[in-house]
Amino acid sequence: MKFLLDGMLRGLARWLRFLGWDAQILQRWEADEIRRWYQREPDRVFVSRSRAHVEAWPGQFKVLLSSDDVAEQLQQLNERFSLVQPDLFLSRCSRCNQPLVAVRPEAVRGKVPERVFERFREFYLCPGCQRIYWEGGHVERLIKKLQRMGLFFSPNCSNQMNETGRPT
Ligand SMILES: [Zn+2]
């Protein structure tokens, strides 16, 4: 399952990516852009706050969101698609939507803070923006935030990660 989000839904896209889902953003609501997406990937689930946009999307799968609040948007999608899947959690770059790839620690020497390099053994790279991710306390905060939004995880989550340059 892959999502295509209307341009107004960048906040939601970020959360979907944290959860591991492919969430692309429709940059412009223009006939050419819509046709391009639909021809390439007609099965993407189109998500919008605009009834007119949802009705105009030519694809079969679409969701009209009923709230402007990101938490409520996530809940609405979660009811329909069961978004919380531990194997997918944090398997994707939240910035550019690319799946992360595991890299050997030697490959990130000098690219992450020394204390991080010494403490963690598993690192992941975004092939798109080159950002490096690792397991860290940031993940717990992320899970708590998701739980506050009504999305629940089982206790053992694989792929728990932090990321470079992120203020914690
Ligand atoms: Zn990236």
Image: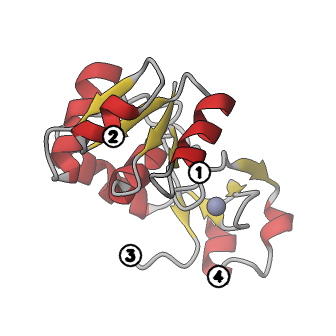
**Mark 3 CB in 8 Å range of ligand 1?**
no
Dot 2 or dot 3, earlier in sequence: 2
The location of residue 33, given as percent across then percent down, is 58, 48
Q: Quadrant of ligand 1?
A: bottom right
Extreme residue toward the top, this view: 60
| Element under disc 2 | helix
Which label is found at residue 97? 1
**Mark 1 CB in 8 Å range of ligand 1?**
yes
97, above or below 156, in the image: below
The location of residue 157, given as percent across then percent down, is 45, 36
Q: From the viewer's perspective, is 91 left or right of 74?
A: right
Residue 63 appears in the rendering: yes
Residue 66 sits in quarter:
top left
The CA distance from mark 3 to mark 4 is 14 Å
The CA distance from mark 1 to mark 2 is 23 Å
Residue 155 appears in the rendering: no
Question: Total number of numbered labels?
Answer: 4
| Element under disc 1 | loop
The answer to whether marks 3 and 4 mark residues whose Cβ atoms lie closer than 8 Å is no
Which label is found at residue 113? 4
Dot 1 or dot 2, earlier in sequence: 2
Which amino acid, by three-letter code, is at mark 1? Asn
Task: Say which quadrant the C terminus sits in.
Answer: bottom left
The location of residue 71, given as percent across then percent down, is 19, 48
Q: From the viewer's perspective, is 126 left or right of 29?
A: right
Q: Disc 2 marks which residue?
A: 53
Dot 1 or dot 4, earlier in sequence: 1
Out of 88 and 76, give the one closest to the viewer: 76
Extreme residue toward the front, this view: 31
